[in-house]
C-alpha cells in the first residue's frame, strides 16, 4: 500500500493502547530490517529519517526507497522527518513525499517554537501529512551513541501543554519526562505522574523519544498512560556496530566480502527492531 499519514496510525494506537514504533533508517539494510520486522509482526510502522543524518545519507534516494518499500509492503508505513529543525527542511521533506513531520523547536524560546510549529502544521495539514511538535526538551539530540541523562529542568510542563497543542494544531506531542537520546547514564527514570497529567492536558497522542535503553515494563506503563509512538535508534546502531567492533564474538573473520557484512547487519538490526515491536504492541493485534 502507499505511504500513510501518521495521524490515523497514532489515533488507532491511542484508542487500542499500543504504540507504533518509529525506527530510523540510515541505509537500505536498516529500512529492509524495519519493514521485514513490521510485516512479520503485522504492525503499522513509522520510518524515521532524521535531519541530523542528512549529511550522511542521500535523503531523496532514501525517501524514494521508503515509498517503494511501503508500496510493496503488507503493513501501513508512514515516513516521518525526525527532528526537523526548520520550516525549509519540513517543506523539502513534504515535497519528497514524507507523510509526517516532527518539528523540533525544543531549543527555541517557547513563542518561537509555537509560531514555527504552527506554520509547519498548516503546511503539513494542507498536504494530508501530520505534525509532531516537541514541548520541553529531550536531551542529547544529535549526540549519536554518547551517554546522556535527562535534565529535569527541561521536562515538559503540563501547564503549558494544552495551550501549546491548541495553538500549534499538532497531531502528536513529543514529551520530555526523563527520557533522553543515546545511551542512558544509569537507569532511565521516567516521571509517570507527569506523563499522566500531560495526557489529560494535551488530549492527543504522546510521543516518547530516546527509546533505546528503556525497559519493557516502563514502555508498557508509558503506553498505558498515553504514549502512542516510540522513537528508537541507538539500539539498532549498536547492533550494527557490534558486528564490526567485536569480531571475536561473531563471524566477521569469515566475511570474505562486504556483502556478507550487509547481510549480517540486516539480520542484527531486524532482531533488535522485532524485539522492541513486540513490546510496543502491548499484546494488541492492530491489523
Ligand atoms: P534513541 O536513539 O535514544 O533510541 O532515540 C531515538 C530517537 O528519539 C529518534 O528521534
Ligand atoms: Zn528523538
Image (cartoon, grey):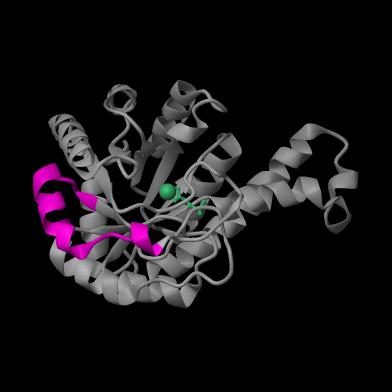
Residue under the image location 14 percent in, 51 percent down: 165
Residue under the image location 42 percent in, 31 percent down: 68
Q: Name the side, left or right, on which 235 lies relative to 227.
A: right
Residue 225 placement: quadrant: bottom left
| Residue 108 belongs to the span the image colors magenta | no
The magenta region covers 152-172
Q: How many marks?
A: 0
Q: Is residue 248 visible?
A: yes
How far from the left and from the top, in percent, is residue 105? 30, 40
Q: Please determine whether, in this image, residue 176 is positioned above or below residue 264.
A: below
How far from the left and from the top, in percent, is residue 177? 36, 65
Closest to the observer, 163 or 81: 163
Q: Name the magenta segment's main secondary structure.
A: helix
Q: Name the side, left or right, on which 272 lies relative to 87.
A: right
Q: Name the side, left or right, on which 40 lies relative to 283.
A: right
Residue 1 placement: quadrant: top left
Amino acid at each position: 500500500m502507499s505511504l500513510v499519514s501518521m495521524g490515523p496510525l497514532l489515533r488507532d494506537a491511542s484508542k487500542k493502547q499500543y504504540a507504533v514504533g518509529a525506527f530510523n533508517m540510515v541505509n537500505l539494510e536498516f529500512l529492509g530490517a524495519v519493514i521485514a520486522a513490521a510485516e512479520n509482526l503485522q504492525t503499522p510502522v513509522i520510518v524515521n529519517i532524521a535531519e541530523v543524518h542528512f549529511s550522511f545519507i542521500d535523503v531523496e534516494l532514501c525517501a524514494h526507497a521508503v515509498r517503494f518499500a511501503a508500496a510493496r509492503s503488507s503493513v501501513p508505513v508512514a515516513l516521518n522527518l525526525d527532528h526537523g529543525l526548520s520550516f525549509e527542511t519540513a517543506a523539502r521533506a513534504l515535497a519528497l513525499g514524507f507523510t509526517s513531520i516532527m518539528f523540533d523547536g525544543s531549543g527555541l524560546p517557547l513563542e518561537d517554537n509555537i509560531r514555527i510549529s504552527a506554520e509547519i502544521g498548516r503546511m503539513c495539514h494542507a498536504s494530508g501529512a501530520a505534525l509532531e511538535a516537541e514541548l520541553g526538551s529531550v536531551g542529547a539530540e544529535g549526540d549519536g551513541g554518547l551517554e546522556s541523562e535527562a535534565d529535569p529542568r527541561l521536562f515538559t510542563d503540563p501547564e503549558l501543554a494544552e495551550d501549546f497543542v491548541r495553538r500549534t494544531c499538532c497531531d502528536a506531542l513529543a514529551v520530555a519526562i526523563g527520557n533522553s537520546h543515546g545511551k542512558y547514564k544509569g537507569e532511565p527514570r521516567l516521571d509517570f505522574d507527569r506523563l499522566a497529567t500531560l495526557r489529560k492536558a494535551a488530549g492527543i497522542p504522546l510521543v516518547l523519544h530516546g527509546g533505546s535503553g528503556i525497559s519493557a515494563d516502563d514502555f508498557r506503563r508509558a503506553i498505558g498512560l498515553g504514549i502512542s509512538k516510540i522513537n528508537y535508534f541507538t539500539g539498532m546502531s549498536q547492533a550494527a556496530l557490534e558486528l564490526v567492533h567485536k569480531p571475536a564474538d561473531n563471524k566477521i573473520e569469515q566475511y570474505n566480502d562486504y556483502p556478507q557484512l550487509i547481510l549480517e547487519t540486516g539480520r542484527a538490526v531486524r532482531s533488535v527492531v522485532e524485539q522492541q515491536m513486540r513490546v510496543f504492541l502491548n499484546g494488541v493485534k492492530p491489523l
